[in-house]
Amino acid sequence: MDREETVCHCMGVNYGEIMNAIETGNLKTIEEVGEATGAGTGCGGCQDMIQDILNEFYSQA
Ligand code: FES
């Protein structure tokens, strides 16, 4: 996924912002990503994608 690609349309949060937040904040859950970036706190429709990003991040670690 492109870092510029918007993941959360409600809050205007892109993939790169979510990855940075996970990395710098050591975030583990959708809720923590929401607190840090706002992503997933609107309609909730992007929460599956946020979970996928978390899974991807921690499978590489
Ligand atoms: S698209 Fe992320 S909360 Fe609606």
Image (tube, helix red, strand yellow):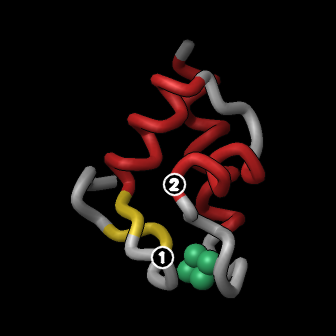
Q: In this view, does 43 lie to the left or right of 36?
A: right
- Measuring from the top left, give residue 16's x and y in whole percent: 32, 47
**Residue tagged by mark 1?**
11
Q: Is residue 4 left or right of residue 11?
A: left
* The C terminus: image quadrant: top right
What secondary structure is found at the residue carrying circle 2? Answer: helix
- Measuring from the top left, give residue 21's x and y in whole percent: 48, 37
Q: Is residue 44 above or below residue 22?
A: below
Q: In which quarter of the image is residue 44?
A: bottom right
Quadrant for ligand 1 reads: bottom right
Q: In this view, does 16 lie above or below 7?
A: above
Q: In this view, does 43 lie above or below 48?
A: below
* The N terminus: image quadrant: bottom left
For label 2, being within 8 Å of ligand 1 is answered: no
- Measuring from the top left, give residue 51's x and y in whole percent: 69, 51
Mark 1 or mark 2: name the one nearer the start of the chain: 1
- Measuring from the top left, give residue 40's x and y in whole percent: 64, 68
Q: Which residue occupies 22% across, 59% down?
A: 4
Callout 1: few (<14), some (14-19), or many (20+) C-alpha neighbours within 10 Å?
some
Tell me how many marks there are: 2
For label 1, being within 8 Å of ligand 1 is answered: yes
The answer to whether the residues at label 1 and label 2 have Cβ atoms under 8 Å apart is yes
| Amino acid type, callout 2 | Thr
Q: Which residue occupies 26% across, 51% down?
A: 3
Q: Which residue occupies 51% across, 54% down?
A: 37
Q: In this view, does 47 lie to the left or right of 36?
A: right
What secondary structure is found at the residue carrying circle 1? Answer: loop
**Residue tagged by mark 2?**
37
How far, Cα to Cα, is label 1 from label 2? 8 Å
Instruction: Specify the farthest residue to the top.
Output: 61
| Amino acid type, callout 1 | Met
Q: In this view, does 55 lie to the left or right of 21?
A: right
